[in-house]
Amino acid sequence: MSVVRLPGPVAKPASPTPRYVTIKTILQRTGIHRQTVHYYLRKELLPQPVRTSRTSALYPSSTIELIDMVHNLQRHQRLSLDEIVVLFRRHNYDVRAIRHGLAQTAQSPLQAVFGDQANALIPISEVADRIDPPPPREWVEKLLVANVLRSEKRNGREFISADTLEALRALWDGLRSGASIEQFQTLALSVDKEASIEFDQFLKNLHSLSDSKEAAPHVARLFSSLERFGAHRRRDALHHLFLDRLRKPGYMFLGPNRRYIFPSRTFLQKMGLFREMDLLLRRLDQNPHDLEALQNLVRASNVSSDWSRLHQAAQEILRVQPGDANAAASLGLALTNLGRLPEAISFLEEVIARGSNPMAKIRLCQALTAQAYESADAARLLDAVVRRSRLAVEAIKESAGNPGLLRKVRLNALLDMLYFSDPLRLNRPAEKEAREIYEEFRALSERKLPVLAKISLSMSRLYSCYALYLILDQEGNAKAAQLLNEIARIDPDCVLAARQQKTALAKKKLRGR
């Protein structure tokens, strides 16, 4: 097995290396994004920083080398982040100990596969203490009796391997989240069955080598390849299944071109949106610093899904008024829908750190979940959904004193929850909440409202109606069809109207049989 050489220690500078560094230094030295550091911290790939204030922290200087190690281990040894976490934990995040451990492992092909069993074995009596929070000691014994986990005896004592400990940690997390031992027992049997099939295939391939002597030097490497491929392929398959079942086009509010799927362009044209935008652009041509025109252009660009123009207008407002909360949230939305997700997340995190901005939190929710969804990593998506729920609750509390802002925050939170959470059956929105929002927007009067305010109100009514429709439709409530008819009546050219017509036609054909 070839030895992968990780970067050696950095040459000592003239002055002593600082014990702690700021996140800015880490970003400059490693070239990664701020949210990647936060993700690594949540995955426990890095030791936790020392908090110096609510928004500031100092990181051990070894964090830079650990990040470099992560990238090298992923690139050259094809280790997953979960496997790297195990490695780093085993050596207590000590860079020198990790390097020494890797060098020792690389000396023997068989060691590379099976590891140093003497160091990897953990006495049963110590297992509970190595899990956070610790489970009852008798619980570990129960799992062994149920054959969910395996142990081995040496010199009259019972041990488990490091891999078994990681499986145990995962199982403990699952049980605390509501799963049952029986579910894990079924999964363990399935894994054992698949492993048996894989091993038989491995032996078949091994025996097919032309010379039996040739097999011996390759056994460890072949077995390692089999194990790594099986583990990664299985994880990949599970994540793809998860994401495929999550993807429900009917719940989407943005089309493939990142435009809102409704209202239709015809509806917006009839409402006078594009004429209003032309007037705003003429005003800005005469006076590029007209703040009122810029603010109205932000609203119009959002409604029309013109993300480039929204980006430009929001940037200009922030140049004149750096503290404009709406412009900051709108810039984050524009960056998200322009596909610049890391930039959107970094910007919105900074906006939130500076002070209260409920809509910026909602836009951060959308950016985080969009990035996690694009990563095709189920665990990362679930992390984003959990954080999104927390941010949405905070945004609703912060906007409680502003009825107009509160309605906007609640509607966006509801739509996000339907799109990302309902297929998972997590934090499923209640019909009561959706109906309240729907009734609130219906009760608002359009009288004396300017054109853009009327269009925004009409759009909010359509989306609150659609959200309530989705919830009722999932419950099999016959009243769902009435709401879809209402959307089709208001905007007969939108994609939902076409969907309603298709459903009505199918029912008509069914009755005719």
Image (cartoon, rainbow, N blue to C red):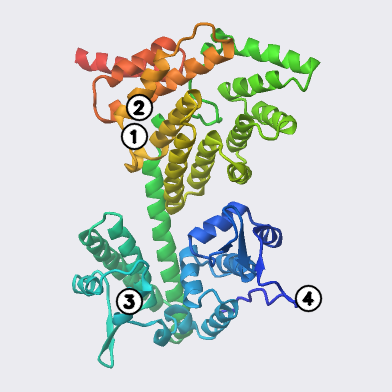
> Secondary structure under badge 4?
loop
Q: Earlier in the sequence, mark 3 or mark 4?
A: 4
Label number found at residue 444: none
**Mark 1 surroundings within 10 Å by alpha-carbon count, few (fewer than 14), some (14 through 19), many (20 or more):** some
For image coordinates 27% across by 72% down, the residue present is 149
| Distance (Cα) linking label 4 and label 2 | 61 Å
Mark 2 = which residue?
434
Specify the amino acid type for callout 2. Answer: Ala
| Distance (Cα) linking label 3 and label 2 | 47 Å
Specify the amino acid type for callout 3. Answer: Val
Pick the front one: 137 or 65: 137
Mark 3 = which residue?
127
Mark 4 = which residue?
15
Query: Which corner quadrant holds the C terminus?
Result: top left
Label number found at residue 429: 1
Horizontal side, residue 284 vs residue 297: left or right: right
Is 239 located above or below residue 355 in the figure?
below
Query: Which corner quadrant holds the N terminus?
Result: bottom right
> Secondary structure under badge 2?
helix
Specify the amino acid type for callout 4. Answer: Ser
> Secondary structure under badge 1?
loop
Which quadrant would residue 113 be assigned to in this image? bottom left
**Mark 3 surroundings within 10 Å by alpha-carbon count, few (fewer than 14), some (14 through 19), many (20 or more):** some
| Distance (Cα) linking label 1 and label 2 | 7 Å
| Distance (Cα) linking label 1 and label 3 | 40 Å
